Amino acid sequence: MLSKEDYLMIEARRREGVYQKDLAAELGVHPRTVRRALKRGGAPTAKRPGARGSQLDRFKHKIDALLREGVWNAVVILREIQAAGYPGGYSILKRYIHPKRGLRRSRATVRFETAPGKQLQNDWGEIWSEVGGKRTKVHFAVSTLGYSRRFHFWCTEIEDAEHIYEGLVRAFEHFGGVTEEVLVDNPASLVVKHRIGERVQFNERFVDLAGHYGFTPRACRPYRARTKGKDERMVGYVKHHFFVRYRSFESWEHLNQLAEQWLAEEADPRMHGTVKEVVAVRFERERPHLKPLPQVRYDTSYAETRWVSWDGYIDVRGNRYSLPDAFRGTKVRIRVRLDGTLSVFDEEVKILEQGLRPAEAGWVTVPSHHAGLWRQTLNVERRPLSVYEEVAQCNS
């Protein structure tokens, strides 16, 4: 017997021009049942004598809420309603969800398969979660191997160029190698200019990263991000699986530790729906085709320049840090690692390494840095007070 939800689906699909016999096939009922429902203008209201309610009935509102949020994976939904007390099995849930899939928004996409080791697709997603007891927007980088569909993701507080580079480097390290090319979207931090029919102009530092790891950078066609659909699908997979299973984290380190554990225990051993093969098994065929990692890790730190002031300090992110006297009035290079470590260089020589401190903690001063400045201060001419008294008398 049709439910109210079934009838709503019939109405929606009918407005889209779907034939009654096709609607009946989707619902698993006879075409006459669909025809009667449309003629009646609703689902049957009276139950058959002796009919029993379904174990799923009192959980349908929760299921429908998850569907409205875009969670369509039956395994994830089953886990959620079991936590709420659902005693039933998977099959009845799947039968309930299946007729509603016609309401799910989708677009037909031609899928292109790539050879082993050929391509890695990189994209970013974001979701609100709880980190360290606070509701926080989590940005996460997802990198997917085009052939095996094995993927890696890494979470952070911000999505800028340095974090994009870090996400790629961590993905290469996770896979143990590098693909021939990396396909990205068109963020300003990676792509300076990309117009149809013209050569793509990539960010200079992204080109430097590509040269260091030996891959060719590629960018999606403008307004056609679905050309990297494998990775976009994995962004949704992470949202609807990992962030549904885990709702709060003690810290960013705890979050990424759980991510690595989840990848190993759930994502890698899964049977992929498109290639019909276990991802980890398929990756073993792709592994030999990956290029080896370079001996030296790429430095993803923020790279900037600073002028050292007359008193021997540089300004970095709202605070001041002292440098040796010899560098007063000169230009130095600074690097700020993503963990908040500040390094200062004169050409290639490191002259300072210091953890960043907030402005309210006060200036960071090393006394030996200002020894020469203090000596100059001590050599300043000292005049007796009588000189100033004579000047005052003359003025009066």
Image: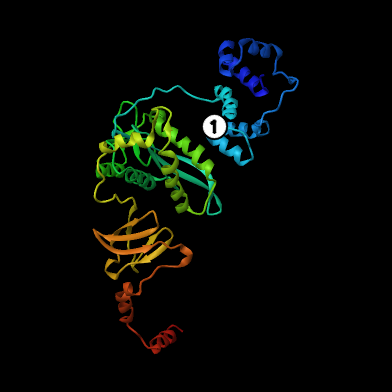
From what the image shows, is residue 101 above or below residue 31? Answer: below
Q: Secondary structure at mark 1?
A: helix
273 relative position to 80: left or right = left
- Residue nearest the observer in this picture, 61 or 383: 61
| Towards the viewer: 115 or 303 | 115
Q: Position of residue 17 (x, y in %)?
A: 56, 13
Q: Badge 1: how crowded within 10 Å, few (<14), some, or many (20+)?
A: some
Instruction: Give the x, y percent position of residue 329.
Output: 30, 64
Q: Tell me which amino acid carries mark 1.
A: Ala
- Which of the colour schemes (rainbow, by chain, secondary structure, one colour) is used? rainbow
Count how many numbered circles sit on residues in the image: 1
Q: Is residue 208 above or below residue 326?
A: above
Specify the quadrant of the image occupied by residue 54: top right
Residue 300 location (% of width, % of height): 33, 50
The percent position of residue 221, horizontal first and vertical second, equals: 36, 29
**Closer-to-camera residue (129/378):** 129
Is residue 183 visible to us here?
A: no
Q: Which residue is mark 1?
A: 74
In the orientation shown, which residue stands out farthest toward the front? 50
Is residue 381 at all visible to an observer of this figure?
A: yes
Q: Is residue 1 above or below residue 347?
A: above
The N terminus lies in quadrant: top right
